[in-house]
Every structure is written in C-alpha cells, then in structure tokens.
Amino acid sequence: MKSLFKQISSWPYPLIMLVLLCIRECTPMPDPHQRDLMLKQELSQQEGGRVELTQAEQRLDSLLHQLKVKEMAVSPFPPTKHFFKVRHIIQKSPIFKLLQKMPKGAALHIHSSALVSVDWLVLNATYRPHCYICFTSKGSVRFLFSAHTPFPRWECFPWSRLDKLRASLGDVTAFDNSLMRNLTLFTEDPETAYPTQDAVWERFEETFLALSGLITYAPVFKDYIYQGLKELYEDNIMYLELRVGQSRAYELDGTFHDRAWSLEVYRNITEQFRASHPDFIGSRIILSVHRSLSVSEVKKDIQEAIEMQKQYPDIIAGFDLVGREDTGRSIWYFREALLVPSEIKIKLPFFFHAGETDLHGTEVDRNVLDALLFNTSRIGHGFALVHHPLAKELSRKRGVAVELCPISNQVLKLVLDLRNHPATVLMSDGHPLVVSSDDPTLFGTTGLSYDFYQVFVGIGGLSANLGTLKELAMNSIRYSSLSPQLQDKATMVWQKKWDRFIAENL
C-alpha cells in the first residue's frame, strides 16, 4: 500500500483527486496513507511548497520551525496584537534577528515620502541650518528651510528657527522626541489614538504634510535618498522600486526644481551608492499621482510620465494612482486618462494600488478587477482580492503579484489579528506574492524585516517554512520591473548571499 501511495503522489493533481475519491468510496475508514498524501499535496501548493531545499537548508528550516513553535506559545503572540504594542517584543525575537540577516531581495512597494527612519529625519535633517518650524491648529507641525523668516502659510504661525528654539529649551531630548511623534503614527495606545479608519487615515495624511517641507529641501532630499538606500541595504535588500509623487524639491531661496531634476538626483544618488556598494542592484521609480485629482489632471500627469519614461527609460518603471481608495476615485473613473498610452501605442506599465479596502461590493472594491483590465504589472496591497475569485485566478495565470504590506494593513485598521489577513488564503494557494513595507517612516520600521516577520510567523503560521521565505525573496526579483538580463544578474547576486546566509546560521 505504501508503494502505491508513493507512486500516486507523482501523478497530476486532478488524477490524484479522482483516485482519492475512489479510495474514499471503497474504504469506510480513511487510510492514514491517504491522509499523508492529501497533506503533502496541500503543502506542495502553498507559497514555497515546491521549493527543493538542500540538506543545509533543511537543517536551518528545522531550527526555524522549533523557534516558531516556541514563539507561538508565548503570550502575547505578536501577530495577534497591534504592531505598535509588540514592536519591542518582535525586536527581541530570535526569528526576527535571523530574518534581519536574511537576503530579502527587493523592496517593491515603498513611498518616497516615508522612506527613512524618523530618528534620522529629526536628529539629522532638522538640525541643519535655516530650518524653520511652526505648529498648526491641529497640533501638527510644518518645516521649511529658508534664508529668512517665512511668511505665514499652511494655517501655521509663527515660524521659529529650530536652532534658536532648541537653545531656549531646557529639555531638547524631550522636544526631539515630540517631533518624532509628529512624524510617525507610532503610539503606545493605538486603539485610543485611532479609534476608526477615518481617524487613522486623517493622521496618516497629515503626517505626510508634516514631512513634506523637510524632505523636499534639495540638500536634505539628496541625503535622504542615500540614507533610504543605506537603511534598505543594511536590512539585506539589494534593489528598490519607489513610488514617487508630485512634490518638487526647493532651494533655500524658495525656487523649485522640476520633476526631471528630481529624477536626475534619484539616478545620480543611486549610482553614487552603488559605487561603494557594488552588490546593490539599483533602484527604479513608479511615478504616482493622487486619486483625488480630476480625469484631466491625471491625463496630463500620464502624458508627463510618458515623456519622463522616454528621457529616463532606465529608471522609470511605470505609473500608479495613490491615496486612500475608500474616499478616492476608482480606477474605472480614470479610464479615459489611463487609455492614453495605448491610444498612442506607448507602453507605460501600471502598478496599481488596488483592493486596499474592506468595503466589499462597492465601486472601490472593484479596483482589483479594473487593475487587471488595465493590465497592471502588480497589485498594491490586494487586501480585497480573495473576495474576487475571477480576479484572483486571472492574476495568478498572468503572474501578477500582490504587493503584501501587512503592517500597513494592520495600522490602517483593515485587520487586527494578522492570522486573519486575507493573504493567508493567497499563501496557502501559492499565489504570486512579494513582501514590502509601504511607509517605514510612519510605522516606526526600517527595511522589510518587520513585515517579513509578520508574514512568516503570523500570516504563514506553522506551515510557512524556509522554502516560503526563499520563494518570497526570489519573487521580489522575479516580479520586479528589471529587464530579464538584470533579473538574472540580481538572482545570481542574491543566490550567493543566500548560500552564505545558510552557511553562517547553521
């Protein structure tokens, strides 16, 4: 009987199911070998289920499994609680520390306005000369670099030069900590601070406004990009695709640079970083506009994106619509603008945010279908995808990966217990997935290790193994916008890092 089941296990899936059905009909008591066969078949379908592990990888996998069993027995189990309440627990986790060392491939879903740690922003950027601050009526802050005291703006008055303000304070550390709280959503009591999705999204968007005047100052902007690449690299990430909005960099005299200037800076800083980190593959940009704009405005922005792509084909990956889906306009609303590239026979890849909602059955909920209708290259978040079986099947067949950002989904109140995240279904079904971090500044994270932890320990549960991690890392290269040649190069570089990681952690 054992040899029979061993032979059956190599058969095609539909034939296996037919044989199992026959066995069930003929055998009143389920055979344990039948059960083993079903379990193996199910495990083979999950993310990483078909990844063959070397003997060394199997030993590390066994260690990871033991660590996870211990971690799941501890209370509180981090993925079941709000990230802000358990970040300090995660930081002490042996699994997290191992994930920090793991080569994770690429970060494919991060916004340029929230790329670096909040500590660097406050302790570096705000200590530079000519930095002014003012406080809004909502209790937020605004920053501006200026050679003279700025005029009142943004419902913000009076402006104070930060060096003078700090000199007048008795406790500068407490003041800097308060600035950090203004530039991140992080709080020890998130349920009270953000009782609803509307409340957390209001603070989310307000924080981007607070960051804007700080990170778009040209000298800070250049160092900010370099620091962002450095923090990713230190978390063992080798490539970045960055969502870049419409903000323009400015100089001390108040003059603004155009978008082309910013793109040149992105390219130059990346090359500067690669010169001292030759195993870093590089970065590309997904130009993004807010979904609150009109059709005519988005059409104009797409035309500009096409021109930018012609000038900078090496760094422009494509185009996206960003902002809260629940209150913004749907992808279908912008269909006239989104057809512009195909009408002039230009290929401008789309990388749509879609399905970042729990409003099932609404026009917004249909964004996942419309994203696929417009041939999106990937789906940002895709939280609602499991409610659309047709879209789910289409994205699988087309190889359209979901950009999974679990901490973002939890902080923005789509899900509390990450064991209940819809991605559990996608992972168990082997759907194309990549892991990313969305807005590290705002969530008090850096790199991808925190999100990998939540995916591996919480969403994947005990079924997720080293093969899962390996496939997720390889997916980030496979589903990137890199050319096939650069994907091959990146994979070779990653494989060497992976082999070293395995050898050093046994």
Image (cartoon, helix red, strand yellow):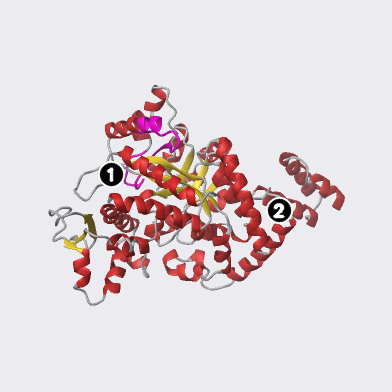
Q: Circle 2 sits in a helix, a strand or a loop, which is it?
A: loop
Q: Is residue 255 above or below residue 86?
A: above
Please state the extent of the stretch shown in magenta in the rendering: 305-330
In-front residue for pair 226/144: 226
**For the point 37% across and 30% down, which residue is it?**
306
**Amino acid beneath label 1:** Arg
**Amino acid beneath label 2:** Leu
- The image position of residue 350, as x and y in percent, is 43, 36
- The image position of residue 261, as x and y in percent, is 32, 40
Q: Quadrant of residue 230?
A: bottom left
- Of circles 2 and 1, the one toward us is 1
- The image position of residue 406, as x and y in percent, is 47, 55
Q: Quadrant of residue 165?
A: bottom left
Mark 2 surroundings: few (<14), some (14-19) or many (≥20) residues within 10 A: some
Q: Which callout, 2 or 1, points at the residue further toward the start of the chain?
A: 2
Would you name the residue on which mark 2 appears?
53
In the rendered view, does 65 fall on the left or right side of 444?
Answer: right
